[in-house]
Amino acid sequence: MFDLLVVAAMLACAWMAVRGARLLIAALWLAGASALAALLLYRLGAPEVAVIELSVGAGLVTVLFVFAINISGEEPPGALTSPVPWPLAALAVAWPLALAATMVLPTVRPAAVLGPADRFATVLWEQRGLDTLLQVVLIVGGVLAVLGLLAARRPRPGKEPR
Amino acid sequence: MSTIGFLALLSIAVPWLGAAVVRLLGDGRPRAQHGTAVSFALAGAAVAVAMIPRATGVGVLDVPLGSAFGRLTLLPDGLGVFLAVVAEVIGSLAVVFSVDYMRGERQLGRYYAYVLFFIGAMVGLVLSSNLLLLFVFWEITALCSYALISFYNDDPKAVAAGIKALIVTQVGGIGLLAGALLLYAYQGSYDIPTFLATAGGLPPTVLAVMAFGFLVAAAAKSAQFPFQTWLPDAMEAPTPVSALIHAATMVNAGVYLLARFYPAFEGVPYWTLAVLSVGTVTALLAAVMAIVSTDLKRVLAYSTVSQLGYMVYAIGAGGLFASQFHLLSHAVFKALLFLSAGAVIHAVHTRDMREMGGLGARMPVARTVMVIGGLALAGIPILNGFWSKELVLEAGHAGGPAWAWAFMLVGAGLTALYTLRFLSMVFYGEPRGRLAAHDAGVAMQVALVPLALGTLTTWLLAGPFGAYLGPAAGAAHAAETTRRIVVQVATAPATALALAVVALGLAAWWRRASLSGVARALGGVGRAASNGFGFEAINRGIVRATVASAEALRTTQNGVLNWNVAAILAGLAAVLAVLALGVVRGV
Amino acid sequence: MIPLSLVASVAVLGLVGIGLFGLLVTRHLIKVVVGLQVLVKGALVALVLAGRITGQVQVAQSMALTVIVADTIVSVVALALAVQVRRQFGTLDVRALSALRR
């Protein structure tokens, strides 16, 4: 029952984040959804990822959102509507999801019987070492991209992050 | 990690590191850029040479890359190390030559970065024993080739030539990729040695599709019939690039591919005949085109296509050793010819041979080395081109049909004819234009002289070379010594016949005035040849179709994110619907 | 009592649906990033759920970690891009970026 409440609250937060009219508020709703997703991950038996999601997804990304919104200013999203009318959008999303739900939900089983579990660190560093390496590359690339983007022409004095 | 594994990795990493460093130096410091490029290229060559005594038939450096890519395994066996050494050594000489040739050019960083990137990728291509990685390196070399052909990117001709080379070699890449995926589907890994050992276990149809897919790939990469027209267009590249990529290394990748997989595909019906025919047709057509062209670099390009045809022909006839030995000779003397042509072009600022003439007196060094290279190309004893071409012809005589052998003999005569033609048009006779000329610079001479010495001497390595290639060269040649090969070639009656044909070719040029009637009669052939015998249309068609389909696909990229997402969702819905209806359940 | 796996499946479908809907209905660059974030959270939960069902939670966790890193980088770069787009074009309209269009 508790899990059901968590999921309901998470989906509500996500909906408000996507549909909310004010950007800063939307960022906060997103942080809420992220925190609740972290809780769900914890309940699913993935505490390490839950912690990372909480700190990165709910923490770091929110801070960055607030920064970006501050720098670029509140441009109300209401004016920038999509060429796709929203009933059509709702239909486009609902139809494949309903199809997926009817196919997937009946087959969902409870958790498998767990054998002696590997330690997360062992899996991360030894079995999937290449992934970890690629993450490092990704982070470096991301940092370079952001630096490049923020340095490109016409910086506004006093409004740069850091 | 074993020494050889370390060296093999280093031979790829050093040039790539150099590429990054040169690029990061920035274009404001040309001296530093020249120096960096030369030192990294020479370091790479040193690493490659150090690999020679350590070649092994066992894979080294085993890195798992996840289930989709298999394992990164390098196989520095005789064949691989040999081609790696060719790439690194000739690459470093081309870089040294560039110091003079590219002096004062803008965007040196881009130039050297791509050249070094290419050298590393070429080494990776020949050392990789994972077919998927081989494909990746294959495509990197194509990319570098494209970028360097289009180096002068304010010249529309250079850009068009680059795109043409890229697209035509991609068509071949599809054949290679199809072969790699088929191998994975039926063998469960991309490992090449495993495939060579167990090829007989694959279904014959699958093996045949792979064999002909690889033939298409090799033909596109090595500019063989019917894809031969991209290489002459590629001559828009700076001349050191033509020498390195479009004469000595990348175009050999196709020959390498055929030689590497020959043991597996040998038994496929009609495959060896197809290879042999492709080589024969290419060698003849390209030789005729070389006779009528008036652009110095294009003549050399046609001649490259023609000589590559000889190598492919030798593989089709089962003469792996002959083909690889000719590859070695050709890499050396053709790099020499291109670089000396570069010295001439750099001095007189034109590629049109009709404006040259009488340059020999003013460019003694360039003339001497180019004549050495030219005589090797024509197959004059005792230069390296003579021995390897005789070996190719001998292999063809022993293992191929008589008609192909006769055609190749004619080709040898034509080769002698066009060689003499371009040498005399450039260096001898009366000066036809008022061209200011100066001899090759110091850096140019540093690059030219070792190649000229190599042209005079590499044939002495025939015996050790055969032993070095070992099983890759076929068992017959593994135990030969240089002396036995020399005696065998020198005493074979076929050699005398070939020399007679070559002499006929030479005589045809001396007596061209009295043969003018014949020349007029053959005028139609000449006109057809200068239009590429109509095969230009095939290649142009491929390029046009690719570009047109890309333009058509552009409408789907209208830049409206929402529609893109909607299209993704529609695709998802379609896939789910198919799954729900169980259409693919039976598969 | 509804099993946790089923609840989590509903959460996956809900998050993915809301995220995709968010991507469909706005041209606002920052709102696009928000939609992307929601979508990826759905993918995260799906990964861990799959690991739970098949008994390979740790492998799923390490993949989820990769997803988090990649997604965060994407968001950061996209936000920096948004800042720059606003500076250059004075708007956060996604269509300002479509230089590929002729």
Image (tube, coloured by chain):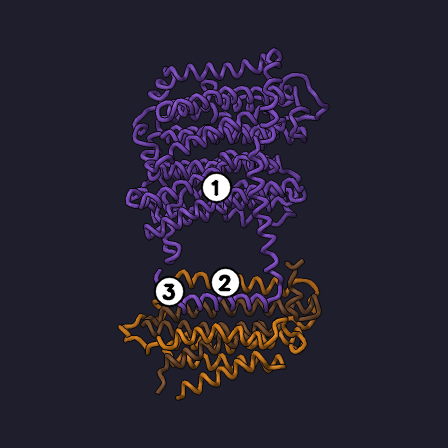
The reply to whether residue C16 is visible in this rendering is yes
Is label 2 in contact with label 1 (beta carbons under 8 Å)? no
| Dots 1 and 3 on the same chain | no
Q: Return the x and y of residue B8 as percentages of the image width and height.
A: 40, 44
Q: Report which residue position mark 2 lands on.
A: A138
Kind of residue at badge 1: Ala
Q: Report which residue position mark 1 lands on.
A: B43
Q: Is mark 2 on a helix, strand or loop?
A: helix
Q: In the rendered image, which quarter is residue B76 located in?
A: top left
In the rendered image, the vertical position of residue B472 relative to residue B455, given as above or below: below
Of tags 2 and 3, the one toward the viewer is 2
> What is the C-alpha distance between the residues marked 1 and 3?
34 Å
Kind of residue at badge 3: Trp
Are there few (<14), some (14-19), or many (20+) residues within 10 Å of tag 1? many
Are there few (<14), some (14-19), or many (20+) residues within 10 Å of tag 2? some
- The brown-tinted chain is C
Q: Residue at point 58% right, 56% down?
A: B553
Of the two numbered discs 2 and 3 on the same chain, state the one appearing first in sequence.
3
Q: Return the x and y of residue A34 as percentages of the image width and height.
A: 49, 79
Q: Residue at point 50% right, 27% down?
A: B333
Of tags 1 and 3, the one toward the viewer is 3
Looking at the rendered image, the quarter that the N terminus of chain A falls into is: bottom left
- The orange-tinted chain is A
On residue A125, the disc is: 3
Kind of residue at badge 2: Leu
